[in-house]
Image: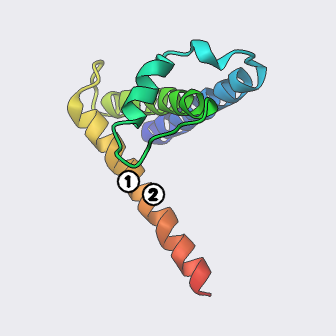
Amino acid sequence: MGNQNNTQQHQIEIENLWSFQRREVEQAHDFKNGLFPLARVRKMMKVEEDVDRISAEVPVVLAKACDLFIRNVTLQSWHQAQENKRSIIQRQDINSTMDSFRDAYHNIEYFKRLMSAS
């Protein structure tokens, strides 16, 4: 029963995170002052040899996507640590979180292929 409550609490916290982030994005007027310096994001994008020109809004969107990704991984990893009765996130928690993301992605891709084959 306790594990089910933890799972429900975990789901509620994830939903709250995304709800908060959605409101934040909808109310934001200036995305250029995010957590990631846009010049650094642009520089990382240009590491790819095929990328020579980048429109102004792309680094802004990518920086926000990175912010959301890190927040999500942190929350999921925190829950993983709690499930293992720890109060510190460790590398194994992040690895487990990334594995679950990878599994979810493969399941989505599998179902997309199934649906397109029908």
Give x and y (percent) for residue 30: 69, 15
Give x and y (percent) for residue 95: 27, 40
Residue for point 43% across, 44% down: 51
Q: Is residue 107 above or below residue 80?
A: below
Q: Nearer the viewer, residue 88 or 43?
A: 43
Could you classify mark 2 by the number of other residues whose Cα lies within 10 Å: few (under 14), some (14-19), or many (20 or more)? few
Q: Is residue 105 above or below residue 90?
A: below
**Which of the 4 image quarters holds residue 80?**
top left
Q: How many numbered markers are drawn?
A: 2
Q: Which residue is mark 1?
A: 102
Q: Which residue is mark 2?
A: 105
For the C terminus, the image quarter is bottom right
Side (left or right) of 22 relative to 96: right
The numbered mark at residue 16 is none
Name the residue furthest front.
52
Q: Is residue 36 visible?
A: no
Give x and y (percent) for residue 113: 52, 76
CB within 8 Å, label 2 to label 1:
yes
Residue for point 28% across, 27% down: 85
Name the residue furthest left.
91
Residue for point 56% across, 38% down: 11
- Asked which secondary structure carries label 1, the reply is helix
Could you classify mark 1 by the number of other residues whose Cα lies within 10 Å: few (under 14), some (14-19), or many (20 or more)? few
**Which of the 4 image quarters holds residue 27?**
top right
Give x and y (percent) for residue 79: 40, 31
Q: Name the colour scheme.
A: rainbow
Q: Amino acid at mark 1?
A: Arg
Q: Amino acid at mark 2?
A: Tyr
